[in-house]
Amino acid sequence: MAEAGAVVVATATRRIAEAVKASGAIVEVESKSFIDIVTKVNKPLVVMAASGVVRKNYRYLVGYKGFIFFTRCKTPLELPRGIDLI
């Protein structure tokens, strides 16, 4: 019985690893860290989405070294010049 549980865990672990390889990894960071990462990227492409009617929420994504960094905040970020913003 213990062996069957170990097989299930090993299978699940392998599938998670395969999914991360296929889609990359999304890492949530604080807004300041996000801006620091954006400044490290050569010609960064930042994706921004705003949502909410009464209370606006802003979400941002940027790719860096194979990872996708994500942050959310209540006010728009002051991003550096020279980025591509979508």
Image (tube, rainbow, N blue to C red):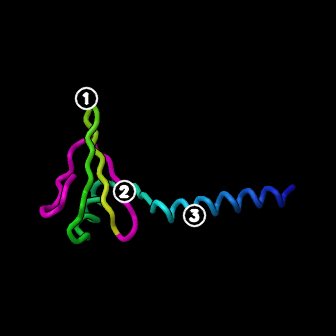
Near mark 3 (Cα within 10 A), the count class, few <14, some 14-19 or many ≥20, is: few
Residue found at the very far front of the displayed protein: 22
Residue plotted at (25% across, 29% down) = 53
Q: Which of pointers 1 and 2 lies earlier in the amino acid sequence?
A: 2
Q: Which residue is mark 3?
A: 17
- Between 38 and 22, which is closer to the camera in this rendering? 22
Picture quarter with the N terminus: bottom right
* Residue 71 sits inside the magenta stretch: yes
Residue contact at pointers 3 and 2, CB within 8 angstroms? no
Residue 11 shown left or right of residue 82 in the figure: right
Q: N-terminal of the two: label 3 or label 1? A: 3
Q: Is residue 53 above or below residue 66?
A: above
Local packing at callout 2 (Cα closer than 10 Å; few below 14, some 14-19, many 20+) is some
Name the spot of residue 62 as percent of width and height, x first: 30, 59
Q: Are marks 1 and 2 in contact (CB under 8 Å)?
A: no
Q: Which residues are magenta?
A: 65-86
The numbered dot on residue 53 is 1
What amino acid type should be assigned to the residue bearing mark 1?
A: Val
Report the residue at 36% width, 59% height from top.
Answer: 69
Q: Is residue 61 above or below residue 56?
A: below
User: Circle 1: is it few (<14), some (14-19), or many (20+) Cα within 10 Å?
Assistant: few
User: In the depicted view, which residue is nearer to us: 52 or 14?
Assistant: 14
Label 3's element?
helix
Which residue is drawn at the image coordinates 25% and 35% (left, top)?
A: 56
Residue 11, picture quadrant: bottom right
**Looking at the image, is mark 1 or mark 2 nearer the viewer?**
1
Which residue lies under the disc numbered 2? 29
In the image, what residue type sits under mark 2?
Val
In the image, farthest residue toward the left: 81
Q: Nearer the viewer, mark 3 or mark 1?
A: 3
